[in-house]
Structures are given as C-alpha cells and as structure tokens.
C-alpha cells in the first residue's frame, strides 16, 4: 500500500520535534564592588533539557583569558529561563577595567559567545 505524500507531510507536522538545546549564552551581567573584591552576577539563557544537556557553569576572565573565578551550576534550569546567579570574591588585577564572562554547558562545552562587562 502506498501512502499519499500529503498524508506523510501531515503526519510529520503532527509529530513532536525533539528539543535541541544549543550553547549557553550570557545575556546580561552586573558587577558590585565589595571592599577590594567584586561580586559578579550573570544572567544565562539555555534551553536546558534535563541532566543530559544543561548550562553547568560560567567563568569570569580578564580580557587576556586569565580565569578569575568559576561558578558551577549544580542542576538543570528547565523551568527557570533565563536565570541569574552570582559569584563573589572575585579579585580583579590592578589596571583591568573589564571582565569577560562566558558560559559552559554539559554538551557543547564553552560557548563561542562572550559577554564583556565594564567595571566601574
């Protein structure tokens, strides 16, 4: 028996598509000076699909790539998107006026996109 093409197209349209999560993105960030250190807050967007694929961390770096701090994200955030988390105790070297924040996810690793935050 041959199934008409329009029936196959209709069936394909009705089947649910798998959720595909790309890389994690930093979509906003802020910095607060606390004494001689900084508290960095980063807002992350990622289509977390559960424990197999989720945004699992982010880092604060100098423009030359030196890591100043890393925040581990201990669980998926499927129902909280985007979400904001903070990391305190960041010591920024003298002469550095901006930091670069990048996100990490459990499948793709480090995102190609970064977020540059001016420190004031």
Image (spheres, rainbow, N blue to C red):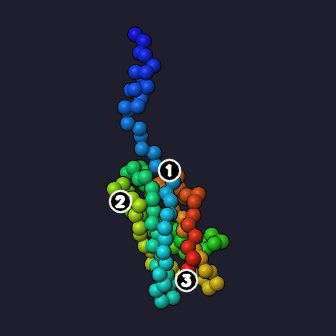
Mark 2 — residue? Answer: 80
Can you say which quadrant of the picture contains the C terminus? Answer: bottom right
Q: Say what secondary structure mark 3 lies in.
A: loop
User: For the residues marked 1 and 2, what is the alpha-carbon distance in whole angstroms?
Assistant: 16 Å
Disc 2 element: loop
Name the residue beneath numbered marker 1. Answer: 22
Residue 120, disc: 3
Q: CB under 8 Å between callouts 1 and 2?
A: no
Question: Looking at the rendering, which quadrant does residue 97 occupy?
Answer: bottom right
At x 63%, y 72%, the residue is 63
Name of the residue lying farthest toward the top: 1
Mark 2 touching mark 3, by CB under 8 A?
Answer: no
Provide the secondary structure element on which disc 1 rests: loop
Alpha carbons under labels 2 and 3: distance apart: 29 Å
Residue 64: x %, y % from top left: 66, 71
Work out which residue is located at the far left of the displayed protein and give it.
Answer: 79
Comes first in the chain, label 1 or label 3: 1
Give the class, few, some or many, for how many residues have Cα within 10 Å of label 3's Cα (few <14, many ≥20).
Answer: few
| Coordinates of residue 102 in the picture (x, y in percent) | 54, 64
Report crowding for label 1: few under 14, some 14 to 19, many 20 or more residues within 10 A (C-alpha).
some
Q: From what the image shows, is residue 2 above or below residue 35?
A: above
Q: Earlier in the sequence, mark 2 or mark 3?
A: 2
Q: Residue at x 39, y 49 (%)?
A: 49
């Amino acid at each position: 028996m041959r199934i008409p093409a329009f029936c196959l197209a209709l069936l394909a349209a009705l089947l649910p598509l798998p959720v595909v999560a790309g890389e994690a993105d930093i979509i906003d960030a802020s910095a607060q000076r606390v004494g001689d250190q900084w508290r960095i807050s980063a807002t992350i967007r990622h289509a977390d699909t559960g424990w197999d694929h989720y945004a699992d961390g982010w880092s604060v770096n100098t423009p030359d790539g030196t890591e100043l701090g890393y925040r581990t994200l201990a669980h998926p955030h499927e129902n909280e998107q985007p979400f904001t988390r903070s990391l305190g105790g960041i010591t920024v070297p003298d002469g550095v006026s901006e930091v670069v924040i990048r996100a990490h996810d459990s499948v793709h690793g480090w995102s190609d996109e970064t977020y540059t935050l001016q420190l004031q």
